[in-house]
Amino acid sequence: MKEDFKQRPVVPSSKQNYYDYYTIQKGDSLYGIARMYNINPELLAALNGLSMEEYIYPNQQILVPKSGFRYYITKDGDTLDLVAGMFKISSDDLVLQNPTVYLSEGQILVNSR
């Protein structure tokens, strides 16, 4: 059975450069947190292996993408050249910014703007 990437996203190993941590407070929602950080709520959910309908718990920590970067979640069949083309950079630059590139479904790749 194929594993759904939302179960376990693969984040870049240097996540402290690309993400902040946010601790869920009572009454928070993914939509509200995304609005607070001015980011796409679907990206926020995917980065944390969640669906938009999933319940989040107080004191749970999630990753919040920092501004100044573009994020892409790989799909089955992606190639290094295809993803690099989406970012409009060379394959070499993509690898430099993402030290571990698996190109398996659900890997998060980052590019500085």
Image (tube, helix red, strand yellow):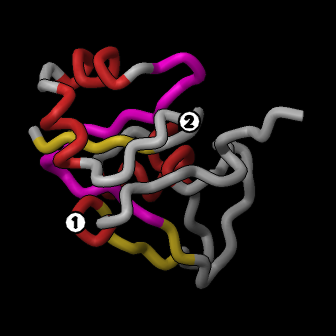
First in sequence: mark 2 vs mark 1: 1
Q: Where does residue 77 sit, x and y in percent of width and height?
A: 54, 17
Q: In this view, does 103 lie above or below 97?
A: above
Dot label at residue 104: 2
Find residue 105 and report its image quarter: top right
Q: Distance between the residues labelled 2 and 1?
A: 22 Å
Position of residue 88 in the picture relative to residue 103 (left or right): left
Q: In this view, does 38 lie above or below 4?
A: below
**Kind of residue indicated by mark 1:** Asn
- Which quadrant is home to the N terminus? top right
Q: Give the range drawn in magenta.
A: 63-78
The residue sitting at 47% across, 49% down in the picture is 44
For label 2, the SS is loop
Mark 2: which amino acid?
A: Ser
Residue occupying the point 29% across, 18% down = 81
Asked whether residue 69 appears in the rendered view, the answer is yes
In percent of width and height, residue 63 lies at: 44, 64
85 or 101: nearer the viewer = 101
Q: Nearer the viewer, mark 2 or mark 1?
A: 2
* Vertical side of 85 occupied by 39: above or below: below
Nearer to the camera, 52 or 104? 104
Judged left or right of residue 96, residue 99 is: right
Frontmost residue, 28 versus 104? 104
x then y, percent, for residue 27: 61, 69
Given residues 9 and 93, the one toward you in this image is 93
Task: Find out whether the residues at labels 2 and 1 contact each other: C-beta distance under 8 Å.
Answer: no
Q: Position of residue 112 (x, y in %)?
A: 13, 44
Mark 1 = which residue? 17
